Amino acid sequence: MKILITNQWMILSAVEFAVIVYMFFLLRKAKRMNPSDLEIRKAKKSDINMDDVMRDMHEAPALYKALSRACHPDRFAGNPIELLANELFQEVQQNEHKFKQLELLKTKIQEQLHIKIKV
């Protein structure tokens, strides 16, 4: 009986040792990576579309500027579509850094205010 109990403890300790060695190698592997490598791996796993991010950063400001000039309420002062221009202008301001939304607003502004916008 005493030998059987000793064998069980020996097997349990061998399994614990194997787990500790495995975790030690994982830790060493993680320490060898640069922090930038870890960030790149995280970015690859994320659902962020970098094309959209770059478009929002670089193309949205120019489109925002053109749209805000085109539908500014002061441009339509005294005109019956002044309230519509004001609503569209507020939408443009809310979506200042969202390129896709600004593209949709561009077509909406062109249709409703009957103006052509050059970007």
Image (cartoon, rainbow, N blue to C red):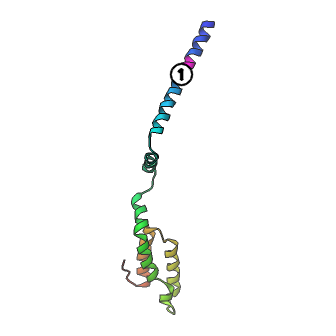
Quarter of the picture holding the C terminus = bottom left
x%, y% of residue 91?
51, 75
User: For the point 47% across and 31% down, which residue is it?
Assistant: 25
As displayed, is residue 62 above or below residue 32?
below
Crowding near pointer 1: few (<14 within 10 Å), some, many (20+)? Answer: few
Q: Position of residue 17 (x, y in %)?
A: 53, 22
Point 52% across, 72% down: residue? 94
> Which quadrant holds residue 10?
top right
The span shown in magenta is 11-17
Task: Please say if 52 is above or below 70.
Answer: above
Quadrant (top left/top right/bottom left/bottom right) for the N terminus = top right
Say what amino acid the circle numbered 1 marks. Answer: Val
Residue bearing the label numbered 1: 15
For numbered disc 1, what is the local secondary structure?
Answer: helix
Query: Which residue is rendered at x = 49% and y = 75% of the image?
Result: 92
- Residue extending farthest to the bottom is 78
Which one is nearer the viewer's eye here, 116 or 60?
A: 60
Looking at the picture, how far across and down is residue 75, in whole percent? Answer: 47, 88
Where does residue 48 sit, x and y in percent of width and height?
45, 55
Viewer-proximal residue, 1 or 26?
26
Q: Is residue 16 magenta?
A: yes
Secondary structure mainly formed by the magenta segment: helix
Task: Please say whether residue 107 is one of the residues in the magenta stretch.
Answer: no
Counting the numbered discs, the total is 1
In the depicted view, which residue is nearer to us: 37 or 105? 37
Work out whether residue 1 can be spotted: no
Judge from the rendering whether residue 75 lies leftward or rightward of residue 6; answer left or right.
left
